[in-house]
Amino acid sequence: MRKLCFALTAAAALAGFCMTAEADSVLPSVMESYEKNADNSYSVSYLEEDPYLVNIYEGYGFAKDYGSARGHAYVLEDVGKTERPHALANCLTCKTADFTKLVNDLGEDAYSLEFESIFPDMHENVGCYTCHEDKIADGTLVLTHDYTLAAIGDEMGDGIAPAIAVCGQCHTEYYFKPENKATNVPYEDIASMDPAAELAYYDEMGFADWVQESTGTPLLKAQHPEIETVLGEGSVHAKMGLSCADCHMEKASAEDGSGYKSHYLQSPLSSEAILETCAACHKDTDMAEKVHAVQAEVTARETEVGEKLSALKDKLAEAVAGGEYSEEELDEIRKLHRTAQWFFDYDYVENSEGAHNSTLAKKCLDTAESVIDEAMGRLGS
Ligand code: HEC
Ligand code: HEC
Ligand code: HEC
Ligand code: HEC
């Protein structure tokens, strides 16, 4: 029975597999809303929008292909066609329930399987299993990703709302462990979900995503730290009890009137039902205007700091090629370069463009800028 439940696909859920007597009338509506994730197909190329990125990511896959996120219905399609290299199965960690199931069956060895050898067996995108394991019938939230369970499992429901923790299984900064390529997160509780603490974690283990050829800097690539931004310093909403689901999944009613959460994950600005919930605190504020104002301010700072970072990279590459600095001096400047790029990226790759927590976004950009200034000073400009 358990095995069968584990192998559940969305289609099987609809057909009523593994359902018990509690299986209830909202399931068809939940399924229908889940299918709507295919509507969110819009993606822009960040590299065309912000050309300085090509320079700062030089030598890494993101310099070749880097588009904005789109709906959960596209994760497998997008990972299949990205021009970034993916040698191992670990890059399926946040794409498909089929892979999560495989990790839970095989253990960490699954992460280092060859990508191409298992990709043909991956059929489901982010699926029911991802957030509910085999508790689909009543919608109980379960952490299925082993590294999330290890890091914050004990805080789920006790400090971290389940409807934040399940999203944080993927909407988080992560890395692959050098020894076995298993996916992991650089924190162990809310307190360590912080850009400075995560950088210290990587520094201590001597971790780098890549060493950039022209500068020789061991750089980090941050990735979508949404759970950190929503729970971390400067955020207001999680402390007031709002979860990711409250803002991205609207409340709806099935035909017989029973309530359920729409499984179409959308911007709060595109849902009247979600916007109504904002009014409980924001009264008659125009929420689109408020959100866009925050995003415009953060994005403008991002461009400013991103261009300065790009200039630092060029200047450092010149210094490396020129040979007038000692390796020791260069290493000190590289450390500053690594730090600045981390703080810049931590803000840039967070998907809300500052809306989740503009305090943290601005703090990251200010930190990046002051470190860039210090590095430029050492390079004599
Ligand atoms: C198994 C991993 C996983 C989980 C769990 C997950 N997501 Fe996602 N999510 C993704 C990926 C990957 C993308 C980007 C898809 C793409 O661009 O192909 C994404 C995209 C999104 C988008 C669309 C982004 C855009 O710009 O259009 C929203 C909104 C979203 N997720 C919200 C959530 C919420 C809310 C939760 C929890 C209820 C959640 N996600 C749980 C992996 C996950
Ligand atoms: C990205 C995470 C995520 C995925 C994937 C997901 N759910 Fe849910 N599900 C949730 C959240 C969050 C809730 C709301 C729980 C709450 O409010 O406490 C929920 C609630 C439910 C409920 C309870 C009724 C309701 O809507 O409040 C059912 C039933 C359910 N989900 C079924 C499914 C099925 C079937 C699938 C696969 C088609 C699925 N879920 C996929 C996160 C997810
Ligand atoms: C207080 C409400 C609120 C909470 C809580 C919240 N978000 Fe958001 N989120 C927003 C707003 C507002 C935006 C910007 C929407 C826009 O630009 O249209 C956004 C944007 C996003 C995006 C970019 C996709 C898009 O449609 O623009 C993703 C992905 C996302 N949030 C995921 C999450 C995750 C995961 C969590 C929990 C860890 C979370 N959000 C918690 C309000 C919220
Ligand atoms: C429980 C009360 C409450 C609810 C509900 C709520 N907010 Fe807020 N929100 C606040 C408070 C308090 C602040 C901080 C003061 C301010 O900026 O208005 C805030 C700030 C914000 C900010 C600025 C964040 C920043 O870091 O700059 C945005 C954007 C925002 N809210 C969007 C939303 C959206 C969208 C919704 C509905 C999906 C929502 N809020 C629901 C209480 C709430």
Image (spheres, grey):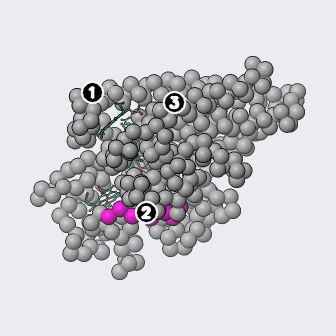
Q: Which quadrant of the rendered structure holds the C terminus?
A: top right
**Vertical placement of residue 103 versus 240, above or below:** below
Give the labeled residue for mark 3.
Answer: 362
Numbered marks: total: 3
**Residue 93 locus on image (x, y percent):** 51, 58
Q: In the image shown, does 229 or 25 lie closer to the viewer?
A: 229
Secondary structure beneath dot 2 equals loop
* Label number found at residue 26: none
Residue at x-position 30% and y-position 74%:
18
Q: Is residue 47 visible?
A: no
Asked whether, in this view, residue 210 is left or right of residue 292, the answer is: right
Asked whether, in this view, residue 88 is left or right of residue 191, the answer is: right
The answer to which image quadrant residue 279 occupies is top left
Residue at x-position 46% and y-position 56%:
169
Kind of residue sitting beneath label 1: Asp
| Mark closest to the chain's N terminus, 2 or 1 | 2
Give the labeled residue for mark 2.
Answer: 143
The answer to which image quadrant residue 308 occupies is top right
The answer to which image quadrant residue 117 occupies is bottom right
Q: Which region shows up in magenta?
A: 140-149
Q: Is residue 201 visible?
A: yes
Q: Is residue 225 magenta?
A: no
Residue at x-position 36% and y-position 47%:
244
Give the labeled residue for mark 1.
Answer: 286
Kind of residue sitting beneath label 2: Leu
Asked whether, in this view, residue 166 is left or right of residue 289, the answer is: right
